[in-house]
Amino acid sequence: MSLDIVRIPVLTDNYIWLVHDSVSGETTVVDPAVAAPVLDAAATRGWTISAIWNTHWHPDHTGGNAEIKAATGAIVTGPRAEAARIPTLDVMVAEGDTVRLGQHVATVMETPAHTAGHITYYLAGDGVAFTGDTLFAMGCGRLFEGTADQMFANMQRLAALPDETIVYCAHEYTQSNGRYALAAEPDNSAIVWRMADVDAARARGEATVPTTIALERATNPFMRAGSSAILAERRAAKDVFSG
């Protein structure tokens, strides 16, 4: 794979992903909350940012758009359904559209629920998915603008991707998600084992993402929910969980 993917931690728990194609020399930024760390990371590596991909309109995913665009001339791509809320948008995409980074092709999957127009970028040829705030490690996004039915459909659709698909989500929520996962499925030994690794990693100050579809299928209580009703119950419980 000629893609280099760099994690840039910002704010309290956000991750921005800097994605570079070493063949074409093109670089995109996924969900830039802020600009300065992104511009610095690219400059340090000698990369020129040519594109920005947004998964949804929230400011902690688009806040760096304008400054990066002004500094680099990057083309901003994001969900057509949220164009009115992303003023820097140049290219509007929807279900089934494709976006290219050199010869790498990302297919747009509409994954609404966290926001009404949320999208995921899936690069099948690279086995990579940028899921924004839809799918987290052992979690899913809050249902701010959509329904449990929508999120259940998202989880089922993402679960159908190949096991080895690497999932790049936008927040370091794994430890708190995992604590709820243990409460939701106390007899799931895969969650117990995973949480031991997660707790150790966080104690060392290490990131716990990306994750994989196989790992989420085994340990994510929202992906494992057998119905939208169960997902709704679990999402409501997680929203007030303090364990």
Image (cartoon, rainbow, N blue to C red):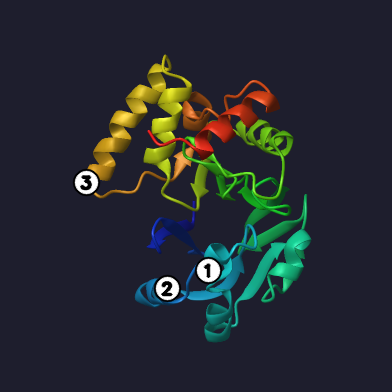
Judge whether 162 appears above or below 83 on screen.
Answer: above
Callout 1: helix, strand or loop? strand
Look at mark 1 in the image and give the residue it sits on: 27
- Callout 1, which amino acid? Thr
Mark before the other along the chain sequence, 3 or 2: 2
At which x and y percent is residue 98? 73, 56
Q: Which of 214 and 1 is in front in this view?
A: 214
Say which quarter of the image contains residue 69.
Answer: bottom right
Q: Do tag 2 and tag 1 residues touch (Cβ < 8 Å)? A: yes
User: Which residue in the protein does label 2 denote?
Assistant: 42
> Which residue is found at the position 45% from the left and 40% from the top?
211
Mark 1: few, some, or many residues within 10 Å (few <14, many ≥20)?
many
Circle 2 crowding by C-alpha within 10 Å: few under 14, some 14–19, many from 20 = many
Q: Distance between the residues labelled 2 and 1?
A: 8 Å
For mark 2, give the secondary structure. helix
What amino acid does circle 2 point to?
Answer: Ala
Find the distance from the CA under tag 3 to the CA under tag 2. 26 Å
N-terminal of the two: label 1 or label 3? Answer: 1
Q: Is residue 130 above or below residue 51?
A: above
Q: Mark 3 points at which residue?
A: 204
Residue 95, given in percent of the width and then of the height, sits at: 77, 50
Q: In which quarter of the image is the C terminus?
A: top left
In the image, residue 49 sits, relative to residue 116, either above or below, namely: below
- Which amino acid type is shown beneath numbered disc 3? Arg
Mark sitting on residue 131: none
